Amino acid sequence: MLNLRNYKFMTLLFVCWSPLCSAQSSAQNAIEHTYNDGPYVVYDEANQRQFNVRHGQGVWQDVPADKQFTRTFEVALSDSYQGVDKLAAISDIHGQVEIFKTLLRQHKVVDDNLDWRFGKGHLVITGDIFDRGDTVTEALWLVYKLEQQALAAGGKVHYLLGNHEYLVLRDDQRYLHPKYVYTASFFDQDLRKLFAANTVLGRWLRSKSTIIKINDFVFLHGGIHQQFLDLDLSLEQANDEFRATIGLSKDALAKNPIWQSLHSRFGPIWYRGYFRDEHLRAEDVGAILTQLNASKIIVGHTSMDEIESHHAEQVIAIDSSIKKGKKGELLLWQDGTFWRGKMNGRVVKL
């Protein structure tokens, strides 16, 4: 298993990418699509190369020296953060980068050039940038850039892994947009090669957490069930166990009781019981929060029309159906109050 603690990575910052370009033509009752995608950066100790799809053609090229720099990033020694004054959170972007950018701009998390302007604030993405939409790569590189800019400003971007990150990283292609099926065709139809440990995005993803706590709020993709708490893992231990499962098959997960539990329907990336278990009571959620020493659990995964609070305001659901490609919302918190940030920049108290 790759040990990521204190592991230094050579990484690259790409602030520009090719916009999606699709052309359609009819030939023998079939429609051919040509896509632009990338970059996917692969490197070894000697050199760095990037792969792009340009108008349907796969192109390899060396990375120019002036776009390379050494950057170290590592797995956090703690997944709890205290003393944070302002927060923004979003979930289930699912390849809809334009909605993501609009919400960040309208609520002053980024400026018009998509550069960080949230100061010492924290931005949390509770998983599922991958799958469904056609601008996943663009969203990944934007988050990658903002993460570095936030650190320089004293803030933080937390990109948490959701169930669709784990699906893609084990080569599950059921929810891919055709654009990414086409890109994978240049890599023997194996998504794992696009995000392997010798790629920038692959190593970056392998550094990510799945569950974090900021102040007294717990953030994750699906939810916390008592079955997870019974594993008696700290957040750091749980995140290390999750990282160890990246890329593993279902059969491999089944051989380890902890891994099987983490990836079960009651596990943190799949659980939907807060919204679908008619027998779950506010008191039950309160008991879970007591064990977590937290006041709220903030999750995505289960789609809503807007950001909602449930179970006596102990659970906040932030999957606002961005995946449909029409609209979405951004959760904002400051001075003890939660707000729903809308596409037009308006805020509504939660």
Image (cartoon, helix red, strand yellow):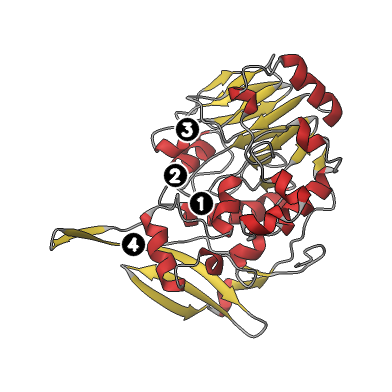
> Which residue is more in the foreground, 253 or 164?
253
Q: CA distance from mark 3 to mark 1?
A: 16 Å
Q: Which residue is mark 3?
A: 321
Q: CA distance from mark 1 to mark 2?
A: 8 Å
Question: Residue 223, can we see it?
Answer: yes
Q: Image quarter for residue 202? A: bottom right
Q: CA distance from mark 1 to mark 4?
A: 16 Å
Compared with 320, 61 (above or below) is: below
**Labels 1, 4: front one:** 4
Q: Image quarter for residue 286? A: top right
Q: Which residue is mark 2?
A: 96
Question: Which percent across, then down, holds residue 55?
Answer: 31, 67
Q: Residues within 10 Å of mark 2 (few under 14, many from 20)?
A: many
Callouts 4 and 3 close, C-beta under 8 Å: no
Under circle 1, the secondary element is: helix
Badge 4 or badge 3: first in the primary sequence: 4
**Labels 3, 1: front one:** 3
Question: Which percent across, then down, holds residue 183?
Answer: 41, 65
Q: Residues within 10 Å of mark 4 (few under 14, many from 20)?
A: many
Callouts 1 and 2 close, C-beta under 8 Å: yes
What residue lies at 79% left-to-right and 26% top-to-bottom? 288
Q: Which residue is mark 1?
A: 139
Compared with 129, 148 (above or below) is: below
Question: Which percent across, then down, holds residue 125?
Answer: 62, 42
Badge 3 or badge 1: first in the primary sequence: 1
Callouts 4 and 2 close, C-beta under 8 Å: no
Badge 3 or badge 2: first in the primary sequence: 2
What residue lies at 77% left-to-right and 60% top-to-bottom? 74
Please give left or right for residue 157 compared with residue 164 in the image. right
Q: CA distance from mark 4 to mark 2?
A: 16 Å
